[in-house]
Every structure is written in structure tokens, then in C-alpha cells.
Image: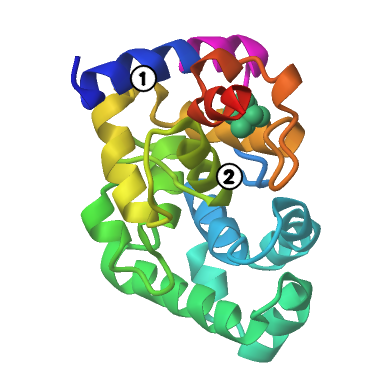
Amino acid sequence: MNKIEDDKKRIAKIMEILEKEYPNVKSDLINTSPFQLLIATILSAQCTDKRVNMVTPKLFSEYPTAKELANAENEDVEEIIFSTGFYKNKAKNIISCSNYLLENHSGEVPSTMEELVKLPGVGRKTANCVLGNYFEPEGIVVDTHVIRITNLLGFVKTRNAEAIERYLMKIIDKKYWVNSTHYFIRLGRAVCIARRPKCSECKIKQYCNNYKENMKL
Ligand code: SF4
């Protein structure tokens, strides 16, 4: 059997197990609209979801839609989002993004990858996040947990997020494109922890190349 066929079967088993292990997964970022998820995801760069959730309630109560945020003063936004890091750039990006939405999409968030990646501060990862949660997924969100775990499992040998995403899109059933990321994030936080994975208690160890390699030692 070639690698891709083998990987398709192996990851299907992994998805089945993780689906049972982590039912009802969803984004941890507080949001009530595509716009709010878009802004929260931009703020989550180099920052934890928990930290973002500490600033977005105030941000969204003062600037609930693109119309309000587009007209915000940089300094006012910077003050609210300061603790998320890189606050000057992030404030500039979310205000520019809101202006772009107003000028080009009547303030609404577009529903395609092609349009989303044209927004200031928005890359494939952010676009995938918004598409997966509110529209039709066009890809898979690849974050640090997904990068680490898919390498350990032996599906990929690269840290390049786009290359990993392309490969995962070939082997993961589309019905799991959104939740696979949530499963790997949960596994990465609780079990497959960076530098100290708890392999003995991992529910997918029988499908993990890293585990099999270490067992040989
Ligand atoms: S067996 Fe170990 S390395 Fe493999 S996914 Fe589970 S925790 Fe991570």
C-alpha cells in the first residue's frame, strides 16, 4: 500500500478515536459573529486564546461591528488589546481590516478563502478558522499543536504549515476538516504535550509512529 492510502486509513482511525475522546469541540475564542471571530483570531497570533478572551468582551462591547471598529482611534484600541502582545500592529490590522470590510463588503465578512486572505492581517490560518466556524471549510487550520503532533504521528516531516495543510487535506475526510484541528489542540494540551508527551496514556498510541519507534529502543 502506498503512503497516502496507508495514511488515509490511519488518520481515519485516529479521527474516530479523538471524536469519542473530545465530543462537542468548538473554537475557544469568545465570539458571536464571523466579524468577532475574525478579529479575535487576528488577536490570537502569538498569544493564547485565554488571553484574547480577556480583552475581547470590552473590545466588542465598544466596537461590535466593522462599522464601529473602522472609525476607532488607534490608541484607544491599543489600550484595550495591549496584553495580547504586538498590540500596535494588531490594532492597526484590525482597524484596517474593518475599513476594508466596509469599503469592499458592506461591513460583512466574505465567505471564501480568496476574499478573506485579501484582508489586512489575515492569512490562511485565520481565514480557515472563520470559514470552518461560519461558512464552508476550504482548508484545515494548522497551528503549533497540529504541526507537532502530525510530525510525531509520522504523517509529515516538515514544520511548514502550508505543506502540512495540503497533505492533511489529501488524507483527512472533509467532514473532519474543522474538528481535526480542535482534536489535535485538545490532545496537545492534555496528552501529547510539547517535550513531555504522556504516550502511555495516549488513546491513539497504536497509530503513532513516534510511539512505535520509541518502543523499539
Ligand atoms: S503516542 Fe505519544 S507522541 Fe504519539 S500522539 Fe500520543 S502522546 Fe503524542
Instruction: Identify whether 4 is placed above or below 27.
Output: above
Measured as percent of width and height from the top left, residue 112 is found at: 26, 48
Total labels: the figure holds 2
Tag 2 or tag 1, which sits nearer the N-term? Answer: 2
Q: Which residue is mark 2?
A: 145
63 displayed left or right of 190 = left
Q: Is residue 50 magenta?
A: no
Quadrant of the rendering where the C terminus is positioned: top right
Q: Secondary structure at mark 2?
A: helix
Question: Which SS does the magenta portion mostly show?
Answer: helix
113 displayed left or right of 159 = left
Q: Amino acid at mark 1?
A: Lys
Residue 26 shows in the view = no
Q: Nearer the viewer, residue 9 or 206?
A: 206
Q: Which residue is mark 1?
A: 175
Q: Is residue 23 magenta?
A: yes
Quarter occupied by residue 211 = top right
Measured as percent of width and height from the top left, residue 105 is found at: 30, 62
Label 2 CA crowd tier, 10 Å (few <14, some 14–19, many 20+): many
